[in-house]
Amino acid sequence: MMISETGTRGRTRSTAEAQRVKIIAHAVPVFALAGYRATPVTDIASAAGVSPAYIFRLFPGKVGLFVAAVDHCYTLVREALLEGSKAAADTSPESMLAAMSDAYVDLIRDRDLIMLQVHAQSACDVPEIREAVQRGIAAMITMVTDTSHAPPADIQRFIAYGQLCHLIVLADLPSIDQAWAHTLSDGIRHHNDSLIRP
């Protein structure tokens, strides 16, 4: 059972779980900027308006906070893909995956979500982070499979498309008018709609 605390003015403060949610929300953009290793907990505490000691009361160290942020990121991805599937033209696997792709492109307008995924993948030598990435991908693949009923090869291409979107956005390939950049980015819908997926 959650026990709320009462401030001097009689207002009820957030429960510990609400504070966790708030801290995670602030942790995502801070971790997205500098990654797991280069981000001090004090930066996240400052952004969230709490003390580092309070963060360590709610999370098992910096790695626990980073894992919670990664879990949150993958939850947002799954929710966006599932919601996007409802806009599919029909229930064919092709239409479902196309609608999910559009939803993902819209979701990554928030570069923090891309950067956090990239940082998480780069820190997979840390067992807890590797497990969080594996857990997030497993849940996403399961949801996409169950929702779209697409065969494994199509889902593999769907995931590869998402990773290519990351590269295009982060490396700003649409701004480069050279053949090699066009090879990667032409025909891929970009979040600013300068590119449209067929």
Image: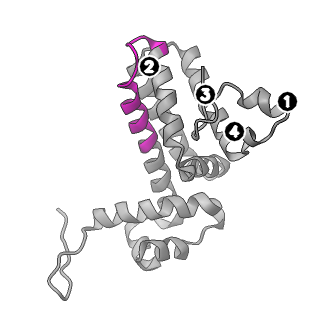
Q: What residue does disc 4 label?
A: 168
The residues tagged by marks 2 and 4 sit, at their Cα atoms, a distance apart of: 23 Å
Disc 4 residue type? Ile
Q: Earlier in the sequence, mark 3 or mark 1?
A: 1
Q: Earlier in the sequence, mark 1 or mark 4?
A: 4
Q: Is residue 87 magenta?
A: yes
The kind of secondary structure element at disc 3 is loop
CB of mark 1 within 8 Å of CB of mark 4?
no
Residue sitting at x 38%, y 67%: 58
Task: Specify the segment rendered in magenta.
Answer: 76-94
Q: Residue 34 carries which label?
A: none
**Magenta-colored segment: predominant secondary structure:** helix
The residues tagged by marks 3 and 1 sit, at their Cα atoms, a distance apart of: 18 Å
Q: Earlier in the sequence, mark 2 or mark 3?
A: 2
The residues tagged by marks 1 and 4 sit, at their Cα atoms, a distance apart of: 14 Å
The residues tagged by marks 3 and 4 sit, at their Cα atoms, a distance apart of: 13 Å
Horizontally, residue 187 falls left or right of residue 79, namely right
Q: Residue 179 carries which label?
A: 1
Q: Which of marks 2 and 4 is nearer the N terminus?
A: 2
Q: Which mark is residue 196?
A: 3
Foreground tag (1 vs 4) = 1
Horizontally, residue 132 falls left or right of residue 83, namely right
* x and y, in percent, of residue 79 in the image: 38, 38
Q: Estimate how packed mark 4 is, as few (under 14), some (14 to 19) or many (20 or more) residues with alpha carbons within 10 Å.
A: some
